[in-house]
Amino acid sequence: MSTATPFHSHRRAAERAAVLAFALYAVCFLRVTQLTVRWPEIRQWKALKPLWPVAWLKHLPPGLGVDLVFVSAIAAGLWVLCKPLSRLSRVVFAVSYLQVLALSMSLAKISHSDHASLWVAILLCLAPGGSPADLARARFRAGWLGAFAGCQMMVALFYSLAGAWKVLAFLHAPPGWVGLLDYGGLGYSIAVKAGQTGSISEAGRWLAGMPLLSTITAWVVTYLQLFSLVAIFRPRLHKIWGVGLIGFHLGSLVGMDVPFLQTVPVIALLWIASPFSPEKSSLAGDLAQLPVLRLGLGGLRRVRLALGEIRYPEKAQI
Amino acid sequence: LRLPTWPREFRPGNLWRARHRRIRLTLALVGFFYLALALSREAEIFPFFSWRLFDLRAPDNVRYSLVLEEVRGKALSPPRNMLEVRGPARALSSIDSRSLVRKLGIALQRKDPSAAAHRQLLESAFLEPLKPIRYQVVAEKFDAASFLASRKITQSETLGAFALK
């Protein structure tokens, strides 16, 4: 079995990372344009308690600060789309994107579906600035691949944290409380959501009525989330994990009306289109890399070696 | 005569810079991890988050909502919950509106002075297009285990009644 190495083709991977960065900025800019629809509405908010990135709005006349935030986000978005390799344009966009998101969340609810794209925009600032000709330089390429890997790791960390909390809740739930991993826990969670929002989808009602299926679903989702940080270091799993995480988000949208739609294209670009995943691979070989399963297969191989069922590979004669 | 030399990307200086980059990245991720763990759901500081989502559900569930008695000068008989209304008041079912009402309800329950600011924000963002409007802020308890079948609210407490002319 051939081993996939992250830098199987340094130059091609770096070029791909730069193109993917452009696509990621396009996703961020799409979010800015979506928020622009709310521009007139946000201007009308009185007694606004701005989040810290836009705390300076309190010192400006009402409406002027909101206009400044939106205009700068649009201008910076267009600039970074024209010059994604310029580090200055990336830094300016990251700051203005942080501002426009903070402004839109200053009313009441912090939307967690924007965190992935925001942190990607922040971490891409670590990539070196230059021009397409600089991709011939190994150091420039290493910088871009490092920054891209950082984005992947950060988003993987989000999912691993979410999975870790669910496992902790399962192990240490206070009496009477229901964890997501408990039998029927997902169904209970769907019912609580329905009670809070006053509505439930047909798919959600169906899943809540099937405790065994919903429990298996909760465990599979938690496995995906918990081991995301492990999977990111196994390039053969990037595509599988990306498909799994997008399936999870679409499922939670249909079943629980939890929209993480801004995260879906980010996952597609970071995981499915990952520049580190090998170009040629087999599904069986990829699945053998699954966390826990690989550990189990490795242990089994050691036992078979010890029992003499299989032989150690012969050392090359020098 | 050409002396053997390091390929450019493996020269010690470049390797050191690459190692530096890796150290910076690792430190940033570890720092984020600790910050995320240190912040609870209540003390969230954007854009840091603990990612504690849907992990545990309490046995007693409370929702905060508005009961509308009059909308655009038209009395509603019987008064309707904001989650059930259609038409122009439908925006009250949005996540931002629900979140604001929850903050207002908790502040009223605790007799916290921040309630006035929450109410002003709610009225300017969502109730202004519906005025003149009369509404109550209520805390409603429901049993999640039986809610899907019965949709029954087990207990309702009025926290305040307000009007916007």
Image (cartoon, coloured by chain):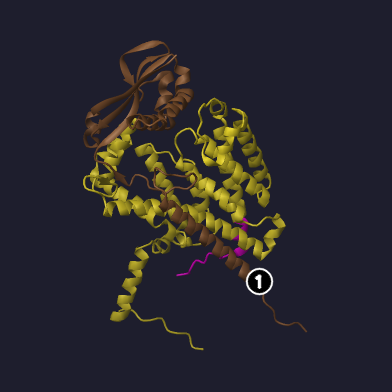
Task: Say which residue appears at 57% left-offset and 57% top-offset.
Answer: A147
Q: Which is more toward the observer, A26 or B158? A: B158
Looking at the image, residue A199 lies above or below residue A79:
above
According to the image, label 1 marks what residue? B13
Say if the magenta span includes residue A12. yes
Q: What chain is tagged by disc 1?
A: B
Say if the magenta span includes residue A300. no
Q: Quadrant of the C terminus of chain B?
A: top left
Q: Toward which corner of the image does residue B99 lie, by quadrant?
A: top left
Task: Say which residue appears at 44% left-offset and 17% top-offset.
Answer: B130
Task: Say which residue appears at 31% left-offset and 54% top-offset.
Answer: A168
The x, y position of residue A24, in whole percent, is 57, 47
Circle 1 sits in a helix, a strand or a loop, which is it? Answer: helix
Q: Which residues are magenta?
A: A1-16
Type of residue at label 1?
Gly
**Is disc 1 surrounded by few (<14), some (14 to 19) or many (20+) residues within 10 Å?**
few
Residue B43 visible to the viewer: yes
Q: Which is more toward the observer, A152 or B32? A: B32
Q: Quadrant of the N terminus of chain B?
A: bottom right
List the single residue furthest toward the right: B1
Task: Say which residue appears at 44% left-offset and 32% top-offset.
Answer: B96
Q: Toward which corner of the image does residue B75 lie, by quadrant?
A: top left
Q: Which is more toward the observer, B32 or A57? A: A57
The answer to whether residue B69 is left or right of residue A238 is left
Residue A198 visible to the viewer: no
The x, y position of residue A132, in whole percent, is 70, 55
- According to the colouring, which chain is brown? B
The x, y position of residue A189, in whole percent, is 30, 41
The x, y position of residue A275, in whole percent, is 55, 57
Looking at the image, residue A234 lies above or below residue B86:
below
Looking at the image, residue B119 lies above or below residue B132:
below
- According to the colouring, which chain is yellow? A
